[in-house]
Amino acid sequence: MIAIERHTLGNYLGYALDHTRWDDAQLILRALKKFWRFVGIEAEFDPWSERIIRATGGPDGTIPRVDTPAGDLWLYAVEGQAGRDLDLHRLDEAERGYLKAVAAIELTGAGAERRHGLDVCYHQLGMVAAARGRTAESEDWYRKAMALKDEDDNASSAASTYHQLALAALERGDHVEAEEWQRKALAIRLEAGDKTRIAESCQSLGMIAEYKDQLVAAVDWYLQALDALGSLGNPTRMAGDIRSQLGNVALRRSRLDQAEGWYREALVIQEALGNRPGMAHAYHNLGIIAHQRRRLSEAEEWYHRALAIHEEFGDDERIATCYHQLGTLAYSRNDLEEAEDWYNKALAVKEHDAAGPNSLAPTYGQLGLLAEKKGNLLEALTWMIKCVALFDEFPHPMTGPAPKHLVRLVDSWTFPPMEMLEEWWDEVTGEPVPGSVRDYVHANLALRAKERQKNRTSPPPTRKPERRAPTSSTLAGRKNVGDLLLSVGIDESIDVSEMSGSGLTAVLREENRSGWRLSPPEGRRFLGEESWPVHHHDHFVGYLLWCRDKSGVTGWEIAMPDGRWVEKGEEFSETFRQWPWRYVSPPPAKRSDGIGRLWTDPADLLVGVADWHYCPRTAIATLFRLVEEGMSASEASRTVHLVGSVGQRLVRRAKRKRAASGLPLSAQVDDFLPIRESDWESGLV
């Protein structure tokens, strides 16, 4: 009926407003608003709300008392427009609208209507806070609303707040409390027979089941929600959202075709409704499917389409999610610098908005994997601890594989792993290791030790080296370079290009071929059973280590201070709490135990370091000289094996200084030394 007469009703509404018939106007508006929402054209409400606010307020925009017919209509329009702003993620506008409504309601006297009005606004302000990821703030608003409901015994309204409290509990990782609240809400809604709200509760229970890894139960709840909505006729925004969630479950079950089908159905519904935030969500999900299929360019396009809409609406939570996915995409391409930039952008948004643990955990975990891939194992361990420590429960479903990564990282040190865990957990969190974490790590370390024992091969010789001065004929004639290094003369220059036994076939940079030197062994706490200081010309490179792990497997490592080479005359101090050592991980074929980080042949290790690292002074001096000779910064960076963006950044800094002081680039080399890995990120290629 309303579909046929809606234009006539619009004329009646205009007449009622022009003739100050406020009660009639509100009756007509309520009927139209319900129809607009049902058919998905809620935008029809916007011009009417603006007209009503102007008509019911005073000439100077004053707010009418809400206990009058004009004020009651004004309040309905303000709350309705704030609800529209919330739906469209215009969160600042939504908050201003609800706070304006609260201020107007508080001017009225006591009574049930006042309590009900505040209840609605508090509830909605909780939803605004939740949309910003501010879980604690949202729960405060919901509990304020709950206090008013208890007083007023409003069952339907109580169910809405139970529902929101369930979502808040789920966001902070308490699925038990979330399920308790949601089942209370569902019981009330089933009794009332409200199909839309029943679908809402079923959808939420599906989310809780999915969170608990009960994927079959999650699908059942989502399908029950769709059944409830199906009885209403036209598709709604919620129907699109539920199809997206069914796609998420299919994706977790590695059913990519099924997931894509659900996502595309969701997109059709959101496009039909003109729901741009919903369209962005579908774009994002289709990007994940393309990413899983290794169609990286297609995935990137979907992610950027989603990001553009989220930025249009200022939806920080989803902007951060897009940043995170773009970081994961760059990580898949092995572009670690770009991946780190995206992850840090995601983290900055999440921390600014005080995001909950569910949001922070994936980014902490990915930053840990990224740090590990760059060889920064202590940083990797720090991120993994931060990830798993977000939740009281351990292991927690939202941390994914982070607990396994935590075990692997503490097991990668020659320092006893449980002591490493205790020490660094306290450093990162300021708290002792929880018993559940300790038990889990201890049990999994034992399993890893058994696996190492099972896969163990014959260890390399453990005899101590003879100290004989090498000759050129010795260097050229020895096939087993590992044996050669164990017998070289201490403090004699070594040319690593003559290490013919190395299987890495590295193409060494000219400045790195010669000038290597091993010094007498030292005992270094935390490093290895024996430690030979390694120098390259005037630089201290680190320690060549012979190690025995907890399973008895022996092998070689090199520990470099802070991932760099220390300049001549520069002091370097070792402190455990700020672990300064970085390591070069062996490729699988070069591992002494087939699993861990120890090298079989020290020659392979030294050749790997010679190929991987620079003499820092030579690198910067050559970069600046080439730029002064007219070569572009990007081309000069490629020539000296620097990542382009890193070399360009160094050149820009030097040029700014030249503009200010007149000092040529070649005279500024010392100003850029010592170079730490953190100064140019993972700039060496």
Image (tube, rainbow, N blue to C red):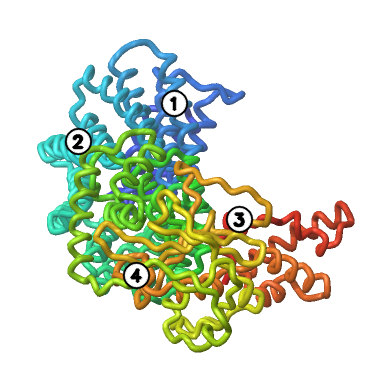
Q: Nearer the viewer, mark 2 or mark 3?
A: 3
Residue at which label 3 appears:
676
Query: Residue pushed farthest top?
Result: 109
- Residue 176, position in %: x, y? 17, 39
Residue 105 visible in this rendered orientation of the protein: yes
Total labels drawn: 4
Separation of marks 1 and 2 at Cα, in angstroms: 31 Å
**In screen coordinates, is 682 left or right of 588?**
right
> What amino acid is labelled 3 in the image?
Arg
Nearer to us in this view, 100 or 128: 128
> What amino acid is labelled 2 in the image?
Glu
The first of marks 4 and 1 along the sequence is 1
Image height of 177 relative to 336, above or below: above
Choose top left, top right, bottom left or bottom right for residue 519: bottom right
Residue at which label 2 appears:
177
Numbered mark located on residue 289 in the image: 4
**In screen coordinates, is 544 left or right of 261?**
right
Separation of marks 4 and 3 at Cα, in angstroms: 39 Å
Question: In the rendered structure, are the residues bearing label 4 and label 2 in contact, judged by CB atoms less than 8 Å apart?
Answer: no
Numbered mark located on residue 101 in the image: 1
Residue lying at 17% horizontally and 44% vertically, measured from the top left = 198
> What amino acid is labelled 4 in the image?
Ile
Q: Secondary structure at mark 3?
A: loop
Image height of 66 relative to 243, above or below: above
The first of marks 4 and 3 along the sequence is 4
Image height of 20 relative to 419, above or below: above
